[in-house]
Image (cartoon, rainbow, N blue to C red):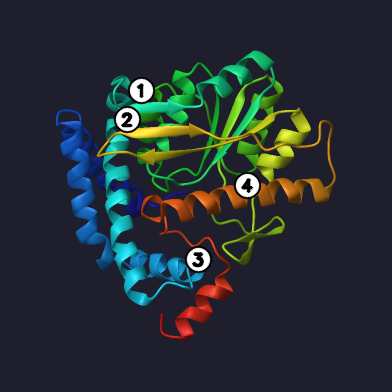
Amino acid sequence: MATRLQDLQWRLETVGYDLVAAIMRVVPIDGASAFGGALFQWLGPLTSAHRTALRNLRLAFPEWDEAQRQAMARRQWENAGRVLFEFFLMDRIIADPGRVELIGMERLEAIKASGRPTVFVSGHFANWEIMAATKVKAGIEGVLAYRGANNPYIDKRMRESRRRYGVNLFAPKGVEGGREAMAALKGGLSLGILADQKYYEGPLIPFFGHLVRTQHAPVRFAMRFGAHLQPGWVERTKGARFRVFVAEPIELPAEGGSAADVEEGLRAINAFIEDRARARPWEYWWVHRRFPDALYEALAKEGY
């Protein structure tokens, strides 16, 4: 239970959140996005997260020299700032038919026609919120698995913001969220998962040449409920304009599957995320610690 001091801090943070949200409701979309990008391109390198981004880039691209990694770390902050400011604008972005182009609508139509539930998997590419909004706009109802904000008042507002662009069902990560996700799939709904976050359990699966603990839920859920396992990604075309790509589905055993089948599906997911991050590294979210802690500790000892 939160202390009074913690609750006061949360409420003050929420006042700041509400102030930014109110401003974002009235400013031009492209201007707000550009301002967020410029602000974080300046602020980002001053934070401890910048060191994490540099370490991630060193682990992912050992062939790059330090100047390349420094330049990419600064460049990815622009996208990060745009994403954070665009969160307040999502309903306005989605409502503008000229801002989001969907590539692969025929696959979504085939998914709907099949009558089977779908587990959508992606990573933190460009503005990943666009993925969930586009899926809803295409007429596919489902649950979004997400990690809630530590501040419960801001978390509530983030849920409300997502509802404005049609994402009405949520499955917070954890045991309770797992039950919600399974209930949704059992009922024929879809499940959306960003599969590139830090995970402390699960099998060790290759990612950028390193073995990382990988969330097995997307594959296990898909196998258990006979669901499609459907990857996709987002690219930023110019400013607050995007393309959403529906990739080829990942094929899984028709009924059930062994531990080896699960690992094969996870290798496909990690390979997909790695391929997309390599293709457009400036649009990937490099500021979370995806790799094993021992690798970061080793880099720290080397002075990185």
Residue 65 x, y percent position in the rendering: 39, 76
Which of the two discs, 1 and 3, labels the residue nearer the N terminus?
3
- Amino acid carrying label 3: it is Ala
Residue 115 x, y percent position in the rendering: 68, 15
Query: Which residue corresponds to the image point at 50% horizontal and 74% vertical from the top-left?
Result: 296
Q: To which residue does mark 4 refer?
A: 269
Question: To which quarter of the image does residue 18 belong?
Answer: top left
Q: To which residue does mark 2 refer?
A: 90
Callout 1 touching callout 3 (CB < 8 Å): no
Query: Which residue corresponds to the image point at 38% horizontal and 23% vertical from the top-left?
Result: 165
Q: To which residue does mark 1 refer?
A: 164
The C terminus lies in which quarter of the figure?
bottom left
Distance from Cα at disc 2 to Cα at disc 1: 8 Å
Which of the two discs, 3 and 4, labels the residue nearer the N terminus?
3
Q: To which residue does mark 3 refer?
A: 60
In this view of the protein, which residue sits in the foreground, 286 or 144?
286
